[in-house]
Amino acid sequence: MKYEIPVTKTSESRLPEVDFNDIPFGRVFSDHMFICDYRDGRWQEPRIVPFGPFMIHPAAMGLHYGQSIFEGMKASKSHDGRPLLFRPDMHAKRINASAERMCMPAFPEELFLAALKKLVGLDAAWIPPQAGSALYIRPLMFASDEFIGVKPSLNYRFIIFTGPVGPYYPKPVSLLAEQKYVRAVEGGTGEAKAAGNYGGALLPAKLAQEKGFDQVMWLDAHEFKNVQEVGTMNIFFVIDGTVVTPPTGGTILKGITRDSIITILKDKGFDIDIRPVTVDELIEAHRGGKLEEAFGSGTAAVVAHVSKIGIGDEVLDLPPVEERRIGELAKKTINDLRAGLIPDPYGWIVEVPVSEAAEV
Ligand code: COI
């Protein structure tokens, strides 16, 4: 199906105000945004309009009961200036998996992809060319019914907006294994990219920061033993030469960067074990000098090296970043794919045709 997405262009671009060499993450927004509303049982009036605030009813259900889900994606520019999207089909599928869990309507994948291409094509000049920078893309769906009462909303708004970003974590992160609060339990919403999952993590993250750590490392809710994920990322360890990451199993976000790293490293001949990892194993590996690397993965972070992990009274200091062979390789491969510097054997890179930009 071909979707018509009418465009109302901004009268004056804000781009000249932006310095791509100094972009605070998440604070700068491009000129346009996509909007589509769900009413009378179907998605209606897809459109691209100048970026800016919109009215929201005080009783909008998404504000009260948490029917709010989102995605995080990136567009980059190839070395010869073509706008590229990274695995947009996976994001289209994942937002619908989140929608299903949160009892929200699916958003048509084809429309998602068409909207992305048109929006990124239109604001292609906002993609920073600097290595490690990108155009961050935020699709968001929330319940917009004006109603007091807990039930699935009948109306929803779906938007996509973008903004140029530099690295999310400019330096390695320190993690504290969380031994009181939990992020997710089997049967819960941990696998969905639901707004509430992030809200619930704020207090433990703040407490970890007060103890001198950057982020929380989540453990299972039963025994506080198995590692789940960290802050805003999935987690990988390199133990005695083997790359290990926990299985998602309903409590861990199915990271698209995580999946990409598993595929890339397998292809490069590394042993990857997708299996539960316990904090005791990490302590033991560290004592034996076998905890060689730890890194988080996510759209925003790409690959963020872990400098140290606090577990109870122990602090596991990890080797210097210069020795992180595998994490660096994963990061470089993803960044090179995104910059079109190496061939893409996976079909992950989707070019935004120049005509998309020209047609509007
Ligand atoms: C991402 O990695 O894109 C995320 O969504 C995590 C965070 C910025 C909320």
Image (cartoon, rainbow, N blue to C red):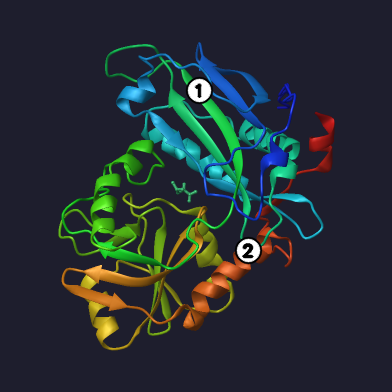
Mark 1 neighbour class, 10 Å CA radius: few under 14, some 14 to 19, many 20 or more: some
Identify the residue at horizontal 24%, vertical 57% (top origin): 210
Q: Residue furthest front?
A: 17
Disc 1 element: strand
Residue 186: x %, y % from top left: 25, 48
Q: Position of residue 16 (x, y in %)?
A: 73, 40
Give residue 11's quadrant in the image: top right
Determine crowd level at label 2: few under 14, some 14-19, many 20+ residues with C-alpha closer than 10 A: many
Q: Is residue 5 left or right of residue 215?
A: right
Closer to the camera in the image, 245 or 337: 337
Q: Residue at x 23, y 53 (%)?
A: 207
Q: Earlier in the sequence, mark 2 or mark 1?
A: 1
In this view of the protein, which residue sits in the foreground, 346 or 37?
37
Q: Which residue occupies 17% across, 59% down?
A: 179
**Residue indicated by mark 2:** 335
214 relative to 53, above or below: below
| Mark 2 and mark 1: Cα distance apart in space | 32 Å
Q: Is residue 253 above or below residue 60?
A: below
